[in-house]
Image (spheres, rainbow, N blue to C red):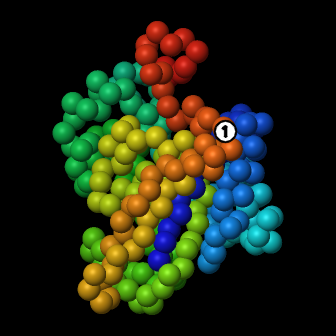
Amino acid sequence: MKILIIRHGDPDYEADSLTAQGFKEAELLAERISNMEIKSFYVSPLGRARDTAAPTLSRMNRQAVECEWLREFAPRIHRPDKEGESIVWDWLPQDWTKTGEFYDKAAWREHACMQDGKVSDEYEWVVRSFDEVLSKHGYEREGNYYRVLHSNLDTIAFFCHFGLECVLLSHLLGVSPMVLWHGTCAAPSSVTTLITEERRRGIAYFRMSCFGDVSHLIQAGEQPSFSARFCERFENEDERHD
């Protein structure tokens, strides 16, 4: 089985929709995805994800299952460098990197700020819901791999968000999401692909064959949007610092 995790196009966060560039990205994405054989579509309830999925679904005359758990992963925590609450996945590198627990696939959730923000509860809800979908498609979680209930070559697609994507990848690959949140960037409208490997009958593991692919943009002469990245140089005043 193949999983496609698709990030929404360039966002207009205030409107919970897409910018003009984001709508263009969604159309270019649709040209790519609509040529694939997709068994099932799943989409976040947030507008920017639904607007990204819409051109693909329209071209294919299909519908997507809307899943609350595919919304952006957004528990609030008290970040050490600022007052008030902050999104869980946005830390300064000089703070999170000095905490060894954050590199551990299990211990990251035990940090006091994560406990205070009930981050583990939302993480468990997301990955449990994700595994329920995979089970319906023939792959049931057993420990750190998947028991094959029904071996298949189906492709299923999830339209969601970068922070949420990193949670799904952390679960599939056994990696702390803190490392993924801060060490990777899936550009708007990008496609991440994972494929099962069943080297012994009945036992499967997901291998990521491609992360954050934006070839549909490059082929059309479009540069990927900057969203999800921070300034390459501190002096770059036109790029976001926070």
User: Is 20 situated left or right of 194 in this image?
Assistant: right
Percent position of residue 59, x then y:
79, 65
- Residue at (34%, 76%) from the top-left corner? 197
- Residue at (57%, 34%) from the top-left corner? 227
What is the total number of numbered labels drawn onto the structure image? 1
- Residue at (39%, 31%) from the top-left corner? 91
Percent position of residue 153, x then y:
50, 81
User: Is 240 situated left or right of 121 in this image?
Assistant: right
- Residue at (29%, 24%) from the top-left corner? 94
Reply above or below: 179 against 31: above
Secondary-structure class at tag 1: loop
Disc 1 target residue: 221
Q: Dividing the picture into quarters, in which one does residue 140 lie?
A: bottom left
User: Is 161 situated left or right of 110 in this image?
Assistant: right
Q: Nearer the viewer, residue 118 or 201?
A: 201
Q: State whether residue 178 appears in this view.
A: no
Give the residue at the far left of this rendering: 100
Percent position of residue 225, x then y:
61, 35
Percent position of residue 51, x then y:
74, 51
Q: Nearer the viewer, residue 200 or 121?
A: 200
Q: State whether residue 181 appears in this view.
A: yes
What is the three-letter code of the residue carrying label 1? Gly
User: Is 52 situated left or right of 227 in this image?
Assistant: right
Q: Dividing the picture into quarters, in which one does residue 208 lie?
A: bottom left
Q: Nearer the viewer, residue 178 or 154?
A: 154
Reply above or below: 227 against 136: above
Q: How crowded is the residue under tag 1: few (<14 C-alpha within 10 Å), some, or many (20+)?
A: few
